[in-house]
Image (cartoon, helix red, strand yellow):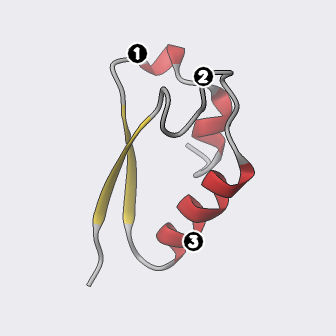
Amino acid sequence: MSKIIFIDVDGTLVDYDNVLPTSAVDVIRKARANGHKVYISTGRSRAEVYQEIWDISGA
């Protein structure tokens, strides 16, 4: 059964130094490859979300 996963950006997906760990990218890609829907949940506007995050899925 596929799941829907929401991930916060600040302090969760990226650390407080604004680093997006490759391990996080790998896990998100693996979850999507296994049929799960992964979305970010943030108070930031789309323009404020780092391009690296959009690049995970090619968005």
The disc labelled 1 sits on which kind of residue? Ser
| Residue in the foreground of this view, choosing between 50 and 23 | 23
23 vs 52: above or below: below
17 vs 53: above or below: above
Q: Position of residue 9 (x, y in %)?
A: 47, 32
Q: CA distance from mark 2 to mark 3?
A: 24 Å
Which mark sits nearer the N-terminus, 1 or 2?
2
Q: Residues within 10 Å of mark 1 (few under 14, many from 20)?
A: few
Q: Quick one: SS at disc 1?
A: loop
Point 58% across, 63% down: residue: 27
Point 47% across, 79% down: residue: 34
> Which is in the foreground here, disc 2 or disc 3?
2
What numbered label is drawn on residue 45?
1
58 vs 16: above or below: below
Q: Position of residue 54 (x, y in %)?
A: 58, 38
Q: Quick one: SS at disc 3?
A: helix
Q: Which residue is mark 3?
A: 30
Q: Quick one: SS at disc 2?
A: loop
The disc labelled 2 sits on which kind of residue? Tyr
Which mark sits nearer the N-terminus, 3 or 1?
3
Report the residue that reaches farthest toward the bottom: 1
Q: Position of residue 36 (x, y in %)?
A: 38, 70
Which mark sits nearer the N-terminus, 2 or 3?
2
The disc labelled 3 sits on which kind of residue? Lys
Q: Which residue is mark 2?
A: 16
Point 70% across, 45% down: residue: 21
Q: Quadrant of residue 43?
A: top left
Q: Quarter of the image for the N terminus: give it.
A: bottom left
Q: Position of residue 13 (x, y in %)?
A: 53, 40
